[in-house]
Image (cartoon, coloured by chain):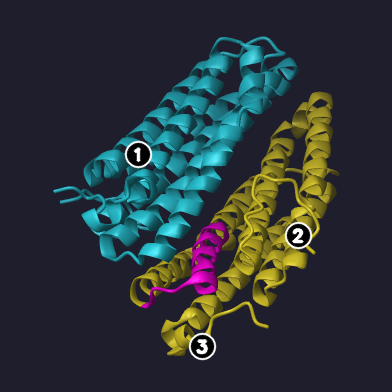
Chain colours: A yellow, B cyan
Amino acid sequence: MSHFPSEHIYRPYEEGLGALRERLLLMGGLAEQRLQAALAALADRNMPGCTEVVRGDEPINRLNLEIDDRSFKLLALRQPMAIDLRAIMSATKINSDLERVGDLAVNIAEAGARYLRHAPLATERDVAAMGDIAREMLHDALDAYMRGDSRLATQVLNRDDEMDALKNDIFRRLLDRMLAAPASVEPALELVLISRHLERVGDHATNIAEDVIFMVSALDVRHHPPASPE
Amino acid sequence: MSHFPSEHIYRPYEEGLGALRERLLLMGGLAEQRLQAALAALADRNMPGCTEVVRGDEPINRLNLEIDDRSFKLLALRQPMAIDLRAIMSATKINSDLERVGDLAVNIAEAGARYLRHAPLATERDVAAMGDIAREMLHDALDAYMRGDSRLATQVLNRDDEMDALKNDIFRRLLDRMLAAPASVEPALELVLISRHLERVGDHATNIAEDVIFMVSALDVRHHPPASPE
């Protein structure tokens, strides 16, 4: 059984829940791309790549407005019930989270551009590892949305602790580095900021996963420790 | 003319838009209190005060869930139109923003507790000034919500640049300090983090102000430079 739109609100496609869902997945793809581009520019010491990410948030912002507008019109004109209503409410929330991920890609690229003015620090590798987890969490959350898969969504929730541990480890190591070598204060500070931005990407992926669980099962799992879905 | 609920959906009060609005204002008050408590604990070098903020996010989290649940039920059972629908959609967004402000109060208190282990830095005063602006922005955004005042909401949007300038100034000064005196690396780093958290409180106040403008005038002003309302 599909967890997605019932027939009567599915048509006409261009105005229905199907179109909303398709736009949201498009936005998810853009958010993933921008995060990936920011992390790649950092790894490749590619300064123009950073600038490109910083300047390129117009398409995601446009989609952000369009998705909210579509959600609003669906609510106003269709008066949807139950699962369709949950799908629309989830879409508006996921939309906000994806827009924030786009902003965080900009923040990462900005800090990355400042970081690249200095010699690389070894901890960059751990920050990149954190970036990989953030990307995976986001990808899995969007995949869970696409498939209406609350089991996969729950797995995303369970990675929060992993991110947190990595963030704390990176913070401690960068602090040690700053204390030992004043010349590394500036780049180390930027890596601290980048790791915080990545933590927030993980938070947004978690929010999306929670919305998927709500959409699929009508359970609100926020503010509770994650558990296995049946 | 009131920008708030039309009669038919206003009653019975306990289940209507009025109750939703009242809960949201209660949540706004809690978020303000928690931000204020975190900043006061920092200013007073009050370590137990920090711990109290870190531990005390249960009430705001409970309200967060309750408000979303009320919004959902209003949408499902009342099939509201136009202004009432905008009020409910805005409430769910403002609800998310206030919950994040509560989280940021925790983050500020956590960083504050670590900062207080060290001798105070002069830049603490500028961080406190940034805290004042963040609190004012949040307060004005909530006031604009309460009164349906899009002019006041627009003023909140216009303070974003002020926050940004202060944040950059604080960052530059703390960086200089870290470079000049390795002993101040740890506390300076915590102040950088606190200033970033405060910047985000300002972002959430901005989001709330944008939602107020949407609720009152049906205009979506996000991703556009702020302008004066007529």
Look at mark 1 in the image and give the residue it sits on.
Answer: B141
Look at mark 3 in the image and give the residue it sits on.
Answer: A7
- The first of marks 3 and 2 along the sequence is 3
Magenta region, mostly helix, strand or loop? Answer: helix
Q: Is residue A164 above or below residue B193?
A: below
Image quarter in which the C terminus of chain A is found:
bottom right
Residue under the image location 76 percent in, 63 percent down: A136
Q: Which residues are magenta?
A: A78-99
**Residue A90 at x, y percent in the picture:** 54, 64
Q: Is residue A82 magenta?
A: yes
The front one of B217 and A100 is B217
Q: Amino acid at mark 2?
A: Thr
Residues indicated by labels 3 and 1 sit on the same polypeptide chain: no
The secondary element bearing badge 2 is classed as helix
Image quarter in which the N terminus of chain A is found:
bottom right
Q: Is residue A121 above or below residue B136?
A: below
Answer left or right for A77 relative to B34. left
Q: CA distance from mark 1 to mark 2?
A: 35 Å
The front one of A220 and A72 is A220
**Residue B68 at x, y percent in the picture:** 50, 52
Q: Are the residues flagged by discs 1 and 2 in contact, CB closer than 8 Å?
A: no
Q: Amino acid at mark 3?
A: Glu
Badge 2: few (under 14), some or many (20 or more) residues near its Cα, within 10 Å? many
The label number, if any, that marks residue A154 in the structure image:
2
Q: CA distance from mark 3 to mark 1?
A: 41 Å
**Residue B134 at x, y percent in the picture:** 44, 31
> Disc 3 vs disc 1: which is toward the camera?
3
